[in-house]
Amino acid sequence: MALRISSCVIALIQRAAADAAPLEACGLLFGADGVERASVEANVADDPARRFEIDPGALIAALRAERGGGERVIGYWHSHPSGDSTPSTTDAAMAAADGKLWVIVAGDAVTAWRAGARGLHGRFERVEVESS
């Protein structure tokens, strides 16, 4: 079964990625049965041209809101200004095997991956994307 991502979400993350280039853009994904909303967050990585780190304050706030009955955080998104929408070895080293989604945007390409204990780089399994 394909992962449904709102076309508005895809447009948002592609626009944020284009605006941030040549740095990586990043944010959070929210939803239940699919990706219904995304946020754009500050990339606080020490080298934002090569990696991303979502602002910890934004992540903590979203998780607190979720615990309080708010939107469910189902994953993360980031851009690869290099043009390759597959996870890098750096992405794999950063990812916990927690089943969260990782959406990567590179130009017009948008791919989705589930973080686990096997797959690409020993961490990511591809998830088909369906725009809604």
Image: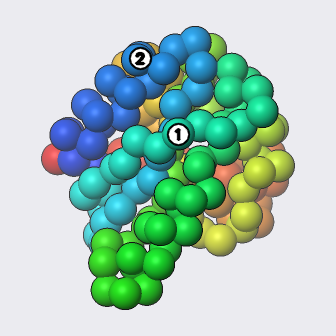
Q: Is residue 130 above or below residue 95?
A: above
Q: Please tell me which of labels 1 and 2 falls first in the chain.
A: 2
Marks 1/2 in contact by CB < 8 Å: the verdict is no
Q: Residue at x 47, y 68 (%)?
A: 61
Determine whether, in the image, residue 14 is placed left or right of residue 28: left
Determine whether, in the image, residue 63 is placed left or right of residue 114: left
Along the line of sight, the residue nearer the viewer: 14 or 126: 14
Q: Which percent across, then down, holds residue 69?
A: 31, 86
User: Does the rendering let one see residue 101?
Assistant: no
Q: Secondary structure at mark 1?
A: loop
User: Does the rendering let one see residue 33?
Assistant: yes
Q: Residue at x 38, y 27 (%)?
A: 16
Please name the amino acid that badge 1 sits on.
Ala
- Residue 130 has which mark? none
Please name the amino acid that badge 2 sits on.
Ala
Q: Which percent across, then down, holds residue 72?
A: 38, 73
Q: Residues within 10 Å of mark 2 (few under 14, many from 20)?
A: some
Q: Quadrant of the N terminus?
A: bottom left
- Residue 42 has which mark? 1
Q: Which percent across, then down, holds residue 53?
A: 66, 44
Q: Which percent across, then down, holds residue 110?
A: 42, 32
Point out the frontmost of discs 1 and 2. 1
Q: Residue at x 51, y 52 (%)?
A: 76
Label 2 sits on residue: 18
Q: Residues within 10 Å of mark 1 (few under 14, many from 20)?
A: some
Along the line of sight, the residue nearer the viewer: 17 or 55: 55
